[in-house]
Every structure is written in C-alpha cells, then in structure tokens.
Amino acid sequence: MPAMDTTIDTDYTPCSIEFCPVQSQSKTSLGSCGFYQTEQKKDQEASESPEVERNGRCILFETSLEDDRIVYHQLQSFDTPAILDQRWTQDPQQPILITADALGGLTSYKLSLPIDNSPRLDRIHSFACCPPEESTLCLSLDISDKKYRASTAKIVCSLSNGQIVLLTQHPTTMNEEHRWNAHQFEPWTCGFDYWQPETILTGGDDCKLKVWDTRNSFVQPVLTNKQFDGGVTAIRSHHLREHLFAVGSYDSNLRIFDKRNFTNPVMKEECGGGIWRIKWDEVNPERVLLATMHGGFKVLQISDNEPYQSSEEGEEKSPRYPTLNASVISSFSHRSDLAYGADWAPKISSSVNSSSPHPSLVAGCSFYDRAIHFWTLD
C-alpha cells in the first residue's frame, strides 16, 4: 500500500503523464499531463459508426511532499489536438516537452521559469508527420537523450498507418531524417536503445517486436520477435543498466530482454493487465513502474537470480546473460479503470521526517476515471 496518496479529478480523459527532469524554483517537481478526449461530432445523424472528434489538452503542474500529504497545483492548461504520448528532453538547463497527437503531428514546447511568475510552457514548433486529412495518428514517441545528453537529440515516432519516423530535434525545429514501413498494423510503441541510439525498437498490433539499425537500410529489421500472444504495446530501454529492455504487451506479460540475445527473454512476468507504459526508476536500477490498463499501476522489484558480473577489462568471455525475477512491491488500483500513463518524479526535498530517506513519488493517470493519481513508496 502507498504511504501517501492523492487523486486529482480532471475534465478530460488523461492519456499520458511525464515529469520534467528539473525542479521549479520552489523545489517542487514539475510535470505535464496530456489528454485525449473523444466526442461524437455535433449535428450528425445517428449511424452505426458515428464520426468522433478527438480533442486534447495539455496541463503543466507542480507537486511536492509536505508533512503527511502530497500537494498538487495546476500551473497552466491549454487546448491542443488529442495527445497520445509525450516526452521531455533531458537538458536540465532548457528542457523541452514534445507531444504526439491525433492529427499526425509533433509539437515542442519550451519550459519558461520566470523569477516573478509561475512556470509555463511556450510553443516552439510543430511538425506534421502526416497531413491532417489522412486521419493518421501519432501513437508514440521517444527521445534518444535519456542516457547521453546531446545538443541535437533524435526523436522516433510511430504512426497509425504502420510507419516509423526518425527526426532530429534542434532548439527551434524538428527535421525528418527517415521514415519507413515497419508494421502491418498499428505500431503502438517505439523506443531507442539509450546506450546506442542508432538502435530503435518498435512493437505493433501484429504481435511483433522489431529491432532496427538506423545505420543500415530500413527495408527490413535486424531482428523480428514473434513470441507475443497480443500486440506489443510498450518498450523501454534501461538507462541505468546496459543491454536490458523491458517490453509490454496486451498479453499482460512483462518481458525483459538482453539485447545480445533477443530470442528469449531473461524474465517473463504476468502482470494482470495489458502493459501500456513502462518506466524504470530514475535512480534505482531494480525498480520498474507499470501502467497495466485494467490491472492498475504496479511497481516491480527486478532482481538477479545471482549477482551480475560483467567481464573484466581485457578478458574474452562468451556473453553470460542475467536471469531475473520480479516481485510486486507497490500497487495502486483505486479508481484505475484503464491505467494509461505513469512516471517517477525526480527526487525532491521533503519536509516529511527530513532525517529519513525521502520517499519516491509516483504519478499515474487513469483514462476512464478522468483522474490523475499520486502516491509514495519508500
């Protein structure tokens, strides 16, 4: 059970939540939540397949731990196309938020931290991955700078038409480098290998996980894994431990792969619901946060069955892959009908028993409940 928790009601249905890598001047955690609201078009005659409008919203918020409670303040709210995914760049001096929307667009926002006013997001640039009239959605995105900072990070985005788009992110623009047909059905997820950003993983409703090397031709993937019993819905490179990837699926199993052997996972754990988001703890390499749709939110402890030892420098050894096991150390299911978004807050100062280690703050958003949840764990 969480030590502390609070729930914030929202007007729209929330789809993704991401914390900014920097604190505000008041030493609180900043974050953003993207909303995806569907409504039947007005003045439309009844039909078996009525057209829907996809409306969106983005909010900027701050949160902190004070005494025995979690404090939340909304700082900004503005309407957008419906947002399916979002990421912050990791530059602590000038973090940028990038959103992926239902009109096939990516939009970047600068975080402004005025001394005499509240933090806010200011739009920088919008990039159309597809013309709006094609009704193609940007389903997911990732940014390459989680492990290694770069002045020109890479962005990868998956589209509902089966394509993947690779872009370069500049301070004021986003430029397309490549696009290719990756999956027969919707590619729900895409992600970089943060240790080697030339490698991109994609997963789709065709129940396939594919690995691509951007230095080679995009005609075919380096590897295709077909062992999934449902669509591949989430991919996350481990930014603290090289070679490891966590992969989620509609089949409710969390699989962890060692990239040196993508044939078989080094761990497979049933999680009680389709896994839509995966986030490794920012500082603890053994904890991973999951949004498991109808199964709520879970934090898993991922441990080695035996101590992991890399080869000594200069030694030539055949690769020894870790074998891992998982245990649930925290779960949150209150008002969690369709858990979609989840993230760890950066470690922040707390007035909660300041002589003790600060608890971890976690956030999740529940789509149908129109709710944002915050809770803590040690």
Image: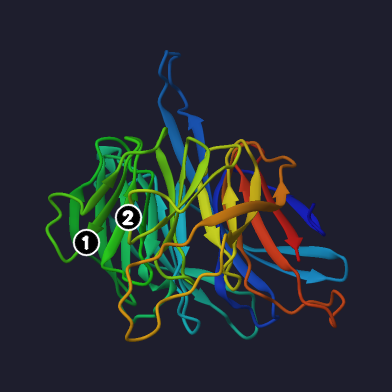
* In the rendered image, the vertical position of residue 287 relative to residue 229, given as above or below: below
Left of 307 or right of it: where is 248?
left
**Secondary structure of residue under mark 1:** strand
Q: Position of residue 95 (x, y in %)?
A: 47, 76
Q: Position of residue 225 (x, y in %)?
A: 31, 44
Identify residue for label 1: 213
Residue 24 figure quarter = bottom right
Left of 219 or right of it: where is 371?
right
Q: Earlier in the sequence, mark 2 or mark 1?
A: 2
Residue at image point 67% right, 60% down:
362
For label 2, the crowd category at 10 Å Cα-Cα, with few meaning under 14, some 14 to 19 and many 20 or more, is: many
* In the rendered image, the vertical position of residue 234 relative to residue 91, given as above or below: above
Residue 129 in sight: no
Q: Position of residue 214 (x, y in %)?
A: 20, 63
Residue 319 figure quarter = bottom left
Residue 353 vs residue 100, the one in the foreground: 353
Q: Amino acid at mark 1?
A: Asp
Residue 179 in sight: yes
Residue 231 vs residue 300, the one in the foreground: 300
Residue 199 vs residue 189, the one in the foreground: 199
For residue 124, which numbered disc appears in the image? none
Identify residue for label 2: 201
Residue at image point 45% right, 54% down:
266
What is the C-alpha distance between the residues marked 2 and 1? 9 Å
Confirm or deny contact between disc 2 and disc 1 (CB under 8 A): no
Residue at image point 65% right, 36% down:
337
